[in-house]
Amino acid sequence: MNNYTKFVKNNIIITSKYLFYISNIFLIIFYLYPGSIFGCFIYNDCGIQPQLTKDFASNTISSNHVYVFAFISLLGFIAYSKKTQFLKVVIYLFLISIILELTHLVIPERGFETKDVAGNILGVIVSLTIFFIFKVRSKI
């Protein structure tokens, strides 16, 4: 690996870390806000959550949650792809996907939904699968 390749790889990792941190901050803000921030801006109604696509598996898995957690997870896996840090990020993402949804039990105007938890976890799993496929293909 030449110096330019190392430089580019380091820049990708550094950028991924910053995007991962920023995304996590926004995720926590959006999750803990009593209502829908997007609904407030788009519909002038904080009680309506915009839906990107129909939910998956006969309405049992939230598509919005899959997309968000797949994006954030992929950033985390790229940023912390070294073996010592990777497992910690995987555990963190699974825990935060459950804990943030559990906070909806106590936040006004929010409600805990198992389809949201399923979407969060599926997003992490999809991202983990994509990451491993690319990692294996790059070694071939």
Image (tube, rainbow, N blue to C red):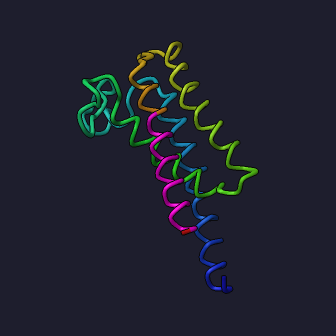
- Above or below residue 94? Residue 24 is below
Q: Locate residue 127 relative to residue 10 in the image: left or right.
A: left
Q: Position of residue 21 (x, y in %)?
A: 61, 50
- Above or below residue 69? Residue 35 is above
Write the residue at 70% across / 42% down. 88
Residue toward you, 39 or 116 = 116
Q: Position of residue 57 (x, y in %)?
A: 28, 27
Residue toward you, 43 or 69 = 69
Q: Position of residue 38 (x, y in %)?
A: 34, 37
Counting every numbered tag in the picture gives: 0
82 drawn magenta: no
Chief secondary structure of the magenta span?
helix
Quarter holding the C terminus is bottom right
Quarter holding the N terminus is bottom right
138 drawn magenta: yes
Q: Locate residue 129 relative to residue 51 in the image: left or right.
A: right
Q: Position of residue 28 (x, y in %)?
A: 55, 35
Highlighted range, magenta:
122-139
Q: Locate residue 93 relative to residue 58 in the image: left or right.
A: right
The outermost residue toward the front is: 140
Write the residue at 65% across / 71% down. 10
Write the residue at 60% across / 77% down. 8
Residue toward you, 75 or 87 = 87
Asked where in the image residue 14 lies, by quadrant, the reply is bottom right
Asked where in the image residue 116 lies, by quadrant, the reply is top left
The outermost residue toward the right is: 84
- Above or below residue 115? Residue 132 is below
